[in-house]
């Protein structure tokens, strides 16, 4: 078996690894044996020289991201087994061979035992995004494995980093690694969407909200709906298909509004039931006299790190208080946070404060999260990033 460089942990620093947490922090390292560069495969050993885990070395605060807790040869067969396990889960979820839905997350980083890697599948096009040098190094292997798994269904593979910062040795490239096709038309629970994988946010579409959009479809009937931070209008389509009287889609990006208009048209929705508005949502809520029966707030992450979480909480309080003031009596509020640094408890506390500031009484109808194709490794609770509430606002 190949001998990999060894990282020896300080005494007493192996407890988190024994609990299968996939991150090793730099402060736990006593010494390394062998030459180690960013992206290299390394093995972790306790201070008593007991094997613990294998992962990619990346330096920084998180020094190693772990993908195996069994000592084995890390080769193409190993990576194929990881991808096949991820694919099998999506098959069990009814996603991989469905004409009703043909877009899903195939690989969700630590949730699928592949930390630093995301792969989204859009009707035959895989969009790959890595956040570690180690995953960058194996991209050619991953492309070949995707060809094997999907066969003729695979139309293209696109490489797209979605991380705001990357290590110096990770070359940021947005390019096709196999074939070339963009944009892509997908079907999600029977609705059609155009996905621009090159220009769109993240990998092109917010697949994590699939189940939550179905709630919006259920609650929208006969209501006047505001879809704030609408991006490409997915919540708007679901609400209109659910029988909303009218939907206003608001986003500060003109490009996002153009995508929204295209997706409204793809689904055969009458324009009389929909209005697109290019505006800053805070100004829109503060200055417009419009009121609504249902408001959907799905803002971008207000906090990327814990150091700015206080400011983020204030932002969530402010935007939700504004929204509640624009809700008609007995209105419905969908509100979300995708900030990993904001816990579910902190987010709910912020919404409670917003209700107090808005002078509204509210009841929680549902707690929402990311879809099951974004599974959370039970040993890595940090993987649970999306939290949401559906409120009945009296």
Image: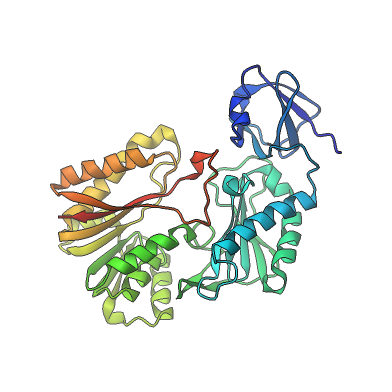
Q: How many marks?
A: 0
- Which image quarter holds the C terminus? bottom left
Q: Is residue 379 left or right of residue 73?
A: left
Q: Is residue 286 above or below residue 309?
A: below
Q: Is residue 230 left or right of residue 198?
A: left
Hey, which quadrant is residue 12 in on the image? top right
Give coordinates of residue 178: x percent, y percent.
71, 66
Asked whether 364 or 33 is in front, the reply is 364
Hey, which quadrant is residue 165 in on the image? top right
- Which image quarter holds the N terminus? top right
Q: Is residue 298 above or below residue 166?
A: below
Looking at this view, name the residue that lies furthest to the right: 1
Q: Is residue 3 above or below residue 261?
A: above
Q: Is residue 159 visible?
A: no
Asked whether 39 or 84 is in front, the reply is 84
Looking at this view, name the residue that lies furthest to the front: 92
- In percent of the image, x 43 and y 39: which residue is there? 341
Give coordinates of residue 360: x percent, y percent.
14, 49
Q: Is residue 111 left or right of residue 348?
A: right
- In percent of the image, x 79 and y 40: which residue is there? 72
- In percent of the image, x 70 and y 43: which residue is there? 134
Give coordinates of residue 311: x percent, y percent.
33, 37
Asked whether 205 or 280 is in front, the reply is 205
Asked whether 137 or 67 is in front, the reply is 67
Q: Is residue 340 visible?
A: yes
Looking at this view, name the residue that lies furthest to the top: 11
Give coordinates of residue 153: x percent, y percent.
67, 73
């Amino acid at each position: 078996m190949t001998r990999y460089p060894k990282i020896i942990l300080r005494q007493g620093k192996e407890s988190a690894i024994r609990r299968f947490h996939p991150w090793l922090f730099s402060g736990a390292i006593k010494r390394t044996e062998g030459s180690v560069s960013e992206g290299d495969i390394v093995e972790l050993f306790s201070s008593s020289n007991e094997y613990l885990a294998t992962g990619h070395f990346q330096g920084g605060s998180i020094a190693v991201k772990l993908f195996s807790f069994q000592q084995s040869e890390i080769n193409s067969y190993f990576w194929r087994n990881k991808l096949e396990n991820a694919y099998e889960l999506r098959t069990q979820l009814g996603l991989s061979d469905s004409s009703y839905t043909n877009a899903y997350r195939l690989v969700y980083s630590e949730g699928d035992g592949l930390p630093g890697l995301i792969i989204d599948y859009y009707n035959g096009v895989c969009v790959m995004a890595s956040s570690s040098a180690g995953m960058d190094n194996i991209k050619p292997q991953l492309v070949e494995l995707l060809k094997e798994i999907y066969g003729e269904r695979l139309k293209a593979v696109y490489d797209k980093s979605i991380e705001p910062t990357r290590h110096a040795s990770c070359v940021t490239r947005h390019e096709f690694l196999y074939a070339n096709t963009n944009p892509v038309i997908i079907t999600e629970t029977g609705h059609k969407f155009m996905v621009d994988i090159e220009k769109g946010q993240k990998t092109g579409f917010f697949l994590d909200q699939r189940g939550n959009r179905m709630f919006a479809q259920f609650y929208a009937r006969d209501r006047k709906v505001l879809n704030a931070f609408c991006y490409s209008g997915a919540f708007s389509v679901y609400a209109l298909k659910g029988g909303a009287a009218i939907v206003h889609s608001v986003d500060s990006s003109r490009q996002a509004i153009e995508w929204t208009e295209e997706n409204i048209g793809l689904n055969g929705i009458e324009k009389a039931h929909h209005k697109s508005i290019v505006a800053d949502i805070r100004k829109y809520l503060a200055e417009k006299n419009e009121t609504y029966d249902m408001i959907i707030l799905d803002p971008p992450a207000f906090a990327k790190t814990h150091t700015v979480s206080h400011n983020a909480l204030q932002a969530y309080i402010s935007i939700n208080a504004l929204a509640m003031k624009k809700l008609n009596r007995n209105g419905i509020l969908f509100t979300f946070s995708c900030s990993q640094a904001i816990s579910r408890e902190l987010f709910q506390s912020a919404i409670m404060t917003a209700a107090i500031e808005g002078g509204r009484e509210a009841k929680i109808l549902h707690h929402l999260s990311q879809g099951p194709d974004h599974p959370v490794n039970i040993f890595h609770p940090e993987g649970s990033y999306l939290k949401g509430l559906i409120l009945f606002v009296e």
